[in-house]
Every structure is written in C-alpha cells, then in structure tokens.
C-alpha cells in the first residue's frame, strides 16, 4: 500500500508541476513567459526532471516558449534485438543494431525529445508547444505543421532555443513498437471523451461539445496514466485517440510508399521545401530526398517500378481491405472509396515479400499481430500521413493507426501535430 500511495503522490505532484508550468506560460504573451515566470518554470522543470529520473524535462524553443517533453534515449531498448523479442515483434535484423529512429544523416544520435502532448490552442490560436491541460491545437494541415516549425526555428527571440522538427514516422514507429514489445499499448479518448476499451476512463473536456454527452477533444494529458504510452505519468500522452497527429517522413504518391531513410526527416538540415513531393531521389541513394522501398528491403528511386505500395483487396468500395503490392492502378477519384484494414494483419500480394524495414517503420504489422490500429489509404495523388486516430473512431485507433487518406494541405477539426528535437550523441 505504501508503494501505491507513493506512486499516487508522485503523479499528483507531477500533474501539479505541469499545471504550474502551463499557468506561467499563459500569463505571458503568446505563451512566452515573463522573466519572473521563466525563473519559476526553470525551477519546476528541474523538479520534474528529478522526479522522472531524467525522462521528462522542460525545453525552450527559439521563440522563447517552454514545452514539456519526454526524453527517448539511445539505450538497450533502442536495439533491434530488444525490439524483435526473438522475432515476435519484428524480424531479428542482423544488418543494423538500432532502430532507424536513432540514425540521422548516417550517424547515430543520442536520442530524441518528443513533445509529451500534442500542440496546444490558446486564446483562439494554435501553438506548436507542448503544455499540460490545454485544448489541443486543431485544424492543422501537414503543410501548415511544417511551416509552423520552420517559422519557430527561424526566430531569433531565443537563439539558444532547441531546433524543432515535426515528429517523424521513424520516431512514431519506434515508440509504437516499444509499446508492443513491452506489452502495454495505451488507451485513450477514442469515443467522444472516453475510452472505447474502458468507458469509465475519461479526460478533462476540451472546448467543443457535440451535445448529448458526446465530447470532442479532451485537454492535453488529462486522461489517466493508462493514456500515456508506458502507463506512467512520465510517458508520452495521447498516442491513441483525441486528435490525429500529422507526422513527417512518409507519404503516398498514387499508392506508392515514399519515405526518408532512417530518421533523416528529423535532420536539422531539413526544411519544408525538402518535403515537397517533387524532391525525389532518382537513385535511392539520397539522404535528403524521398525514396521508395523494394521487396528485398533496399531503397530505390521514389515511385520506381517494382517498389512497394498499397492497393485494394477486391472491388474499390468504401473502407475495403488492402494489401501490400509492387504494382497497382491508382483509383480514379476519391469517390471510389478507400483502403481500411487492421495494420496488424495487413498482408502482401502473392509473390511479394514484406521486408524488415516495413515492419520497423510500422508500414506493415508487427509479427505478433498485436499492434492496435487500422491503416487507411487512398491510391490517387499525394497523401500525407497522420497517426494515433481521432476522438471518434473507437477500435480503429491505437499506436498502429496509420492514415494516408488526406492531401498534405488538408485540415479538419480533428487534425493536430506535435514536434520533437534531437538529442546529440555523447
């Protein structure tokens, strides 16, 4: 009982600290705290880092705004041998030692700091900042997310601030596989303010109400610890439901998969223009351009003949099954429906192999078929990727939710994003 009480006391204290950080930021202008409140936030951040044993901290961007982040370090859990769990989650890869999330521009990094919460909304405006108990930012497009981060990095208000990037596919994939490997996949707001898996789990209502007891979003981080990726108050919040998060480093073009190698989408050298669909590799050897994947796991020119993509299983109806292919005829229009299938059991066309890298990037299911969430896709034109699932989708949400339905310029009342920053190698 003493240990349980201690955990409860720590959680209560951490929530208090995070709320005080939020309050102090909100007393400033544009979430930039006053000098006095900055000192206060620094002291709170020190306590948060101590209580979390270094897993959480407060960082500052170049606009001088604080964000609460989760530190994901290059450690034993980053090794593919750990994630594979003897080939249960992903294949035992003998080519690489660590997950691609920890490789940027051909070098190992020390890890990455991911925003603990989705971007937030304050006084009617969206901010690319991670604060507790705030309405999440909504109406965000992928193009808008990339622009926001570029604008933040270009600011000279706080030149010593961290260089941010839109969270990448590699980073999301690593955290998702870690959840599967460790036997805990978070619940979340996937049923109008509550969990479809455990309806007594709820969060603090956000600013929109459908009426009739149906809520839209919940405020950032206000769900129980089972809504954090590792089941503790120190984890990443809302990796299932609430609002979908646009991420960088993966797109579909006419059904074919385009990615950036490793975690190169997170490189400090990347800017929005690099993610334009026309910035394609013609060889598969580029680190700063889109490439595609062959069935043998090698990289090739983006969209090249024989590279992997998604296609319908059966007739092109509404939310029909899909599979991994090397050739397809793109759908004629959005009216032909879309692919909708469980990521865990997504299979390949006859004679097509699913290489390890597809599972490492969660573009195909884990070998245990336990990853939760659906994959959705359209096979016409350019499609960005958002993850985790919205507040309304129930059992289709989860750490394995991958949605390639929308164009990069699209936004809705359930689209948000979050940022991350790299931890240098020691």
Image (cartoon, rainbow, N blue to C red):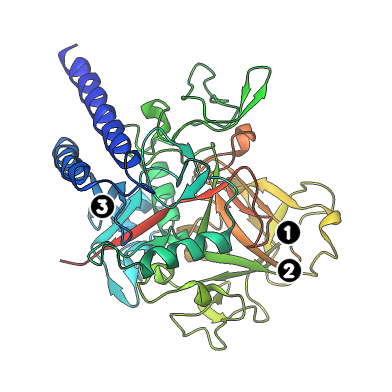
Q: Residue furthest top?
A: 1
Indicate the position of residue 332 as horizontal and vertical percent values: 85, 65
Q: Is residue 165 left or right of residue 198?
A: left
Q: Is residue 315 visible?
A: no
Query: Could you tell which of marks 1 and 3 lies nearer the N-terminus?
Result: 3
Residue 212 seen anywhere in this rendered image of the structure? yes
Across and down, in percent, residue 200 comes to 50, 16
Q: Nearer the viewer, residue 346 or 251?
A: 251
Local packing at callout 3 (Cα closer than 10 Å; few below 14, some 14-19, many 20+) is: some
List the residue tagged with mark 1: 378
Q: In this rendering, which labeled residue sits more in front, label 1 or label 3?
A: 3
Q: How many marks?
A: 3
For residue 228, which quarter of the picture?
top left
At 47% from the left and 65% from the top, the residue drawn is 357
Work out whether 378 lies above or below 206.
Answer: below
The answer to which of marks 3 and 2 sits earlier in the sequence is: 3
Q: CA distance from mark 2 to mark 1?
A: 8 Å
Q: Secondary structure at mark 3?
A: strand
In this rendering, which labeled residue sits more in front, label 3 or label 2? Answer: 3
Q: Which residue is mark 3?
A: 59
Query: Quadrant of the rendered structure where residue 216 is?
Result: top right
Which x, y percent locates residue 78?
30, 56
Mark 1 crowd level (few <14, some 14–19, many ≥20, 10 Å Cα): many
388 left or right of 9 in image: right
Asked if the residue under mark 1 is in contact with the one under mark 2, i.e. CB atoms within 8 Å, the reply is: yes
How far apart marks 1 and 3 lie (CA) works out to 38 Å
Q: Which residue is mark 2?
A: 381
Q: Residue furthest bottom?
A: 283
Of badges 2 and 1, nearer the viewer stands 2
Residue 350 position, x and y percent, is 70, 63
Image quadrant in which the C terminus is located: bottom left
């Amino acid at each position: 009982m003493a240990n349980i009480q201690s955990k409860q006391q720590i959680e209560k204290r951490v929530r208090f600290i995070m709320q005080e950080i939020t309050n102090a930021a909100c007393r400033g202008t544009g979430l930039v705290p006053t000098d006095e409140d900055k000192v206060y936030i620094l002291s709170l951040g020190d306590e948060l880092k101590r209580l979390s044993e270094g897993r959480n901290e407060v960082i500052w961007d170049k606009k001088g705004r604080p964000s609460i982040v989760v530190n994901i370090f290059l450690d034993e859990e980053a090794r593919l041998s750990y994630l594979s769990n003897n080939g249960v989650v992903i294949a035992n890869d003998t080519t690489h030692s660590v997950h691609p999330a920890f490789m940027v521009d051909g070098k190992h990094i020390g890890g990455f700091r991911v925003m603990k919460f989705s971007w937030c909304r304050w006084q009617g405006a969206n901010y690319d900042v991670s604060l507790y108990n705030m309405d999440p930012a909504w109406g965000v497009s992928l193009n808008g997310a990339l622009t926001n981060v570029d604008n933040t990095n270009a600011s000279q208000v706080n030149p010593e601030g961290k260089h941010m990037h839109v969270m990448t596919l590699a980073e999301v994939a690593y955290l998702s596989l870690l959840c599967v490997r460790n036997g805990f996949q978070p619940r979340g707001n996937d049923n109008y303010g509550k969990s479809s898996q455990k309806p007594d789990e709820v969060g603090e209502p956000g600013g929109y109400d459908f009426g009739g007891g149906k809520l839209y979003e919940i405020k950032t981080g206000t769900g129980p610890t089972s809504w954090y990726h590792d089941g503790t108050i120190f984890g990443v919040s809302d990796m299932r439901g609430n609002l979908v998060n646009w991420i960088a480093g993966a797109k579909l073009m006419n059904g074919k998969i385009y990615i950036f190698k490793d975690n190169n989408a997170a490189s400090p050298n990347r800017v929005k223009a690099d993610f334009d669909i026309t910035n394609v590799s013609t060889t598969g050897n580029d680190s700063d351009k889109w490439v595609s994947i062959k069935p043998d796991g090698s990289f090739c020119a983006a969209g090249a003949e024989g590279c992997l993509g998604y296609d319908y299983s059966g007739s092109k109806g509404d939310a029909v099954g899909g599979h991994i292919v090397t050739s397809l005829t793109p759908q004629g229009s959005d009216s032909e429906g879309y692919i909708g299938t469980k990521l865990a059991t997504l299979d390949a066309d006859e004679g097509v192999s699913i290489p390890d890298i597809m599972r490492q990037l969660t573009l195909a299911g884990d070998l245990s078929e336990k990853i939760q969430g659906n994959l959705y896709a359209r096979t016409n034109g350019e499609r960005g990727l958002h993850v985790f699932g919205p507040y309304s989708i129930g059992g289709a949400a989860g750490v394995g939710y991958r949605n390639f339905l929308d164009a990069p310029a699209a936004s809705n009342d359930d689209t948000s994003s979050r940022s991350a920053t790299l931890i240098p190698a020691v």
